[in-house]
Image (cartoon, rainbow, N blue to C red):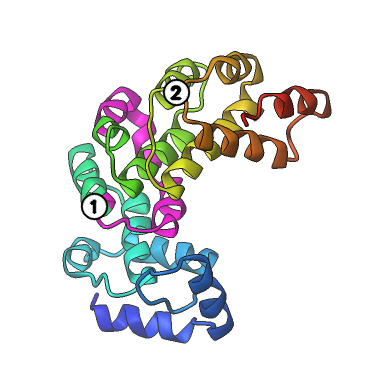
Amino acid sequence: MENKKVRKWLEEHAEPKLREFSSALVPGARPMYGVRLPLLRAYARELAKREDWRAWIEGASDDTVEETLLQGLVIGYARMEADEAYTCLAAYAAKIDNWMLCDSPCCSFTFVRRDRERTWMFLQPYLASKEEFPLRFGVVMLLDHFLTDTYIDKVLECLDGLRPEGYYARMGVAWALSVCFVKYPRQTMPFLEQSRLDDETFNLAVRKILESRRTPEESRLLIRSLKRS
């Protein structure tokens, strides 16, 4: 599997209007083709079934968003032993420099659920990072794979201890908290009432909870009252 074949596929499925729209959502990102995510996921599944997917990952280009994003998706879909999977995941995480490269593949890394304790430890350096996108990666991985009865309290405690720097790191924490509230309101409400998060991140979380259609009407007044001035 050669890079030029992947690029040819991307060129054939590129949409100029989508490229223009997506580029505006991710300012400063590497160039884009403008290929829809469902198509990228389907193509990544096809690539992951090929015998030479490892060789392609090793030599893949990071020149565009889609080429980089495909690498993350293939890692999520390919079959491999745990040690190799975590090694590939760490290599991909080092390439994340915008929210699109972070959020779209994270939900595909379902192999991490086979050993959540190992994954929890794997994520700690990212959750302790002062850099914007490593921290967002750690938080989105918690959001996608750790909102369970067993882990919800640990997730809330972890989120409360974060001091995110940068808009996308803060928004990642806010997004995670909004989903925590929808799924586990009984555990999340006391957390919100006593949260040690900085005001900007906390107010973003309040906004995200209120924006969610899944937030019960009877909870909205109380949530609004928590907003900090």
Residue type at mark 2 is Asp
Image quadrant assignment for residue 98: bottom left
The image shows residue 85, relative to residue 20, as above or below, that is above
Which is more N-terminal, label 2 or label 1?
1
Residue type at mark 1 is Ala
Q: Distance between the residues labelled 1 and 2?
A: 25 Å
> Where does the magenta region start and end?
93-122
Q: Residue 128 carries which label?
A: none
**In front of the other: 217 or 146:** 217
Q: How crowded is mark 1: few (under 14 residues within 10 Å), some or many (20 or more)?
A: few
* Quarter of the picture holding the N terminus: bottom left
Is residue 112 highlighted in magenta?
yes
Please tell me which residue is depicted at 44% across the width and 79% down the height of the picture.
Answer: 33
Which element type, helix, strand or loop, lies under badge 2? helix
Q: In x, y percent, where is residue 101? A: 39, 58
Is residue 144 highlighted in magenta?
no
Q: In x, y percent, where is residue 216? A: 78, 28
Residue of label 2: 160
Q: Residue 94 carries which label?
A: 1
Please tell me which residue is depicted at 27% across the width and 84% down the height of the picture.
Answer: 4
